[in-house]
Image (tube, grey):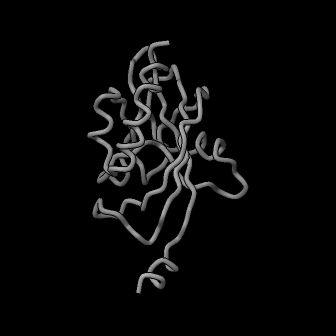
Amino acid sequence: NDAKERSRILDTRSAGGIVINKKFGKVVMVSQRGNSWSLPKGHLEGNESDMEAAVREIQEETGLKNISFVERLGEYTRYKIGKDGRDDKSERKTLVFFLFETEELHLCPEDEKNPVASWMYPKDVPNKLTHSSDAIFFANNIDKIQNALTT
């Protein structure tokens, strides 16, 4: 029964960022539990705004503390990534992303569930992202990202 199925879906909101380093020409990505790659992001906590959650999650998942806001990139909805790498339809996430830049190079994740952070060239990011919706969102924003890297 579809209606029953839908009523069990948890709707959540997450915020995160595409963080670039101009000198390096790269974007930061994070690995969750070692089985999936995504952009740094996470659920809003308490009364946090999208921006506050994005900045906190970026720091937790990458260790980057000095980031500067460039622009809001938009939002989209997808299911969360399950432990097997496929859609976990128990949670439907609305993801909002901002573009940030940093001069920091050293990545030092503070979140044990996301132990790996890595700098990657923008052209490599869509193929590395585990969730196709994340890859499409990134690809749709590649011009803004490349422009920010070169201005």
**In the displayed structure, would residue 75 be above or below residue 123?**
below
Residue at (47, 38) in percent of width and height: 62
**In the displayed structure, would residue 74 be above or below residue 43?**
above
Residue 148: x and y in percent read: 49, 20
**In the displayed structure, would residue 72 be above or below residue 102?**
below
Q: Is residue 34 left or right of residue 89?
A: left
On the question of residue 58 being in view, the answer is: no
Residue 73, quarter of the rendered image: top right
Q: In this view, does 133 lie to the left or right of 60?
A: left
Residue 127: x and y in percent read: 26, 40
Residue at (41, 33) in percent of width and height: 28
Query: In this figure, what is the number of numbered marks?
Result: 0
Residue 84: x and y in percent read: 28, 64
Residue at (28, 41) in percent of width and height: 128
Front one among 135 and 65: 135
Residue 139, quarter of the rendered image: top left
On the question of residue 151 being in view, the answer is: yes
Residue 22: x and y in percent read: 45, 17
From the image, which quarter does the N terminus lie in? Answer: bottom left
In the picture as drawn, the residue positioned furthest to the right comes out as 47
Front one among 63 and 3: 3
Residue at (60, 26) in percent of width and height: 68
